[in-house]
């Protein structure tokens, strides 16, 4: 049986009025499609687990986002432009989501990917899987939009460098701290610097 996390109840309750129906619908369909789903909070937003991370969702001031952990391997999502806002762009109403039938099919496809056996290797060697890009906070996206140099640098960075900035901001426990990190990020990006530039020549 699946599990429900009270922290996600609280997350949805604190979200904007427009966001709550979207998040509740996504949550409901995920549980319906995968009865064994387990809920948790990672990086400050809801994640759904089924033999690993299956998908996640997030809400911001003016939109929501929903994405699959292995989106790049999903045939029904191939060709979708990669954004910092999940696999379906900015979600402002239920109309922005695929219909329930398609959404359940996508969830089933993601489940199948998570159940595929890992092929044996002649010489087993630990290998880290490439991580998909995190959903960037809206405040950070707005700040990037106001600084062309910073945005150009961020857009041209590798996924790992972009992740370093987004994770740093998402790890802030207070909004004040997050805002300060966004300000520092914009300053470093406008100078063309990766997040950990101080240690790159050490």
Image (cartoon, rainbow, N blue to C red):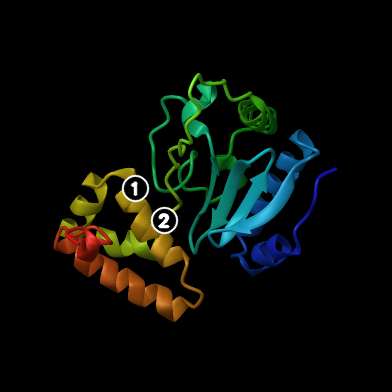
Pointer 2 with pointer 1, Cβ within 8 A: no
In screen coordinates, is 19 left or right of 194?
right
Residue 26 visible to an observer of this rendering: yes
Residue at (40, 64) in percent of width and height:
168
Q: Position of residue 63 (x, y in %)?
A: 50, 55
Judging by the rendered image, the residue that carries numbered circle 1 is 160
Q: Position of residue 178 (x, y in %)?
A: 41, 73
Judging by the rendered image, the residue that carries numbered circle 2 is 136
Residue at (50, 19) in percent of width and height:
122
Under tag 1, what secondary structure? Answer: helix
Q: Is residue 186 above or below residue 28?
A: below
Residue 147 visible to an observer of this rendering: no
| Image mark count | 2
Quadrant where the image shows the C terminus? bottom left
In screen coordinates, is 184 left or right of 23?
left
In screen coordinates, is 96 left or right of 187?
right
Residue at (65, 64) in percent of width and height:
11
Residue 99, quarter of the rendered image: top right
Quadrant where the image shows the N terminus? top right
Residue 145, quarter of the rendered image: bottom left
Under tag 2, what secondary structure? Answer: loop
Q: Position of residue 171 (x, y in %)?
A: 47, 67
How crowded pointer 2 is (Cα within 10 Å; few <14, some 14-19, many 20+) is rated as many
Q: Which mark is residue 174?
A: none
- Work out how far the residue at label 2 is from the one at label 1, CA to CA, in angstroms: 13 Å
Residue at (51, 74) in percent of width and height:
173
- Of tags 2 and 1, which is closer to the observer? 1
């Amino acid at each position: 049986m699946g599990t429900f996390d009270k922290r996600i109840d609280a997350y949805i309750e604190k979200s904007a009025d427009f966001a709550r129906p979207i998040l509740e619908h996504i949550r409901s369909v995920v549980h319906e499609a995968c009865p064994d789903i387990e809920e948790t909070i990672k990086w400050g937003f809801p994640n759904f687990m089924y033999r690993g991370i299956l998908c996640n969702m997030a809400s911001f001031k003016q939109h929501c986002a929903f994405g699959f952990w292995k989106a790049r391997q999903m045939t029904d999502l191939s060709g979708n432009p990669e954004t910092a806002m999940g696999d379906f762009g900015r979600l402002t109403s239920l109309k922005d989501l695929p219909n329930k039938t398609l959404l359940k099919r996508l969830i089933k496809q993601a489940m199948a990917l998570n159940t595929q056996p890992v092929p044996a290797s002649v010489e087993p060697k630990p290998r880290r899987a490439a991580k998909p890009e995190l959903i960037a906070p809206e405040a950070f996206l707005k700040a990037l939009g106001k600084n062309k140099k910073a945005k150009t640098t961020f857009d041209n960075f590798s996924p790992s460098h972009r992740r370093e900035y987004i994770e740093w901001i998402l790890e802030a426990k207070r909004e004040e701290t997050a805002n300060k990190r966004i300000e520092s990020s914009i300053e470093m990006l406008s100078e063309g610097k990766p997040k950990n530039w101080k240690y790159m020549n050490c």
